[in-house]
Image: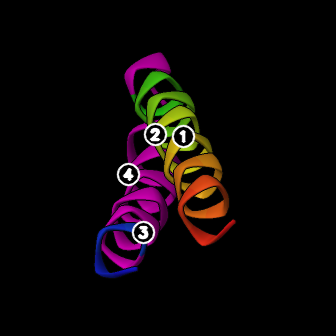
């Protein structure tokens, strides 16, 4: 759960970075964070069942 919280903070900072810089690297960073978040979401569901 803590890992997902950290990733969310990273996602938000990537959003503000994109606003400030407007670069494609920020978009890439956000998509990578989403992939990792999705993986952990699935992992938690598997562990719960």
Instruction: Confirm whether the magenta stretch covers residue 16.
Output: yes
* Dot 1 and dot 2 residues touching (CB under 8 Å): yes
Of 9 and 14, nearer the camera is 9
Tell me the quarter of the image containing the N terminus.
bottom left
The mark that comes first in sequence, 4 or 1, is: 4
Q: Residue at x 37, y 64 (%)?
A: 13
Q: Please, what secondary structure does the residue beneath circle 4 have?
A: helix
What percent of the width, then of the height, locates residue 38?
Answer: 62, 44
Q: Is residue 45 left or right of residue 18?
A: right
Check residue 17 in the rendering and tell me which mark sits there, or answer none: 4
Q: Which residue, given by chain and number where applicable, does mark 1 sit on?
A: 39
What percent of the width, then of the height, locates residue 44?
Answer: 55, 63
Q: Nearer the viewer, mark 4 or mark 3?
A: 3
Task: Kindly report the distance in space between the C-alpha atoms of the residues bearing marks 2 and 4.
Answer: 19 Å
Q: Is residue 6 left or right of residue 40?
A: left
Q: Please, what secondary structure does the residue beneath circle 2 have?
A: helix
Check residue 36 in the rendering and tell me which mark sits there, or answer none: 2
Of 40 and 26, nearer the camera is 40
């Amino acid at each position: 759960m803590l890992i997902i919280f950290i990733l969310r903070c990273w996602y938000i900072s990537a959003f503000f970075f994109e606003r400030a810089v407007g670069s494609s690297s920020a978009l890439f960073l956000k998509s990578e964070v989403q992939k990792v978040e999705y993986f952990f979401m699935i992992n938690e569901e598997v562990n719960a069942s």
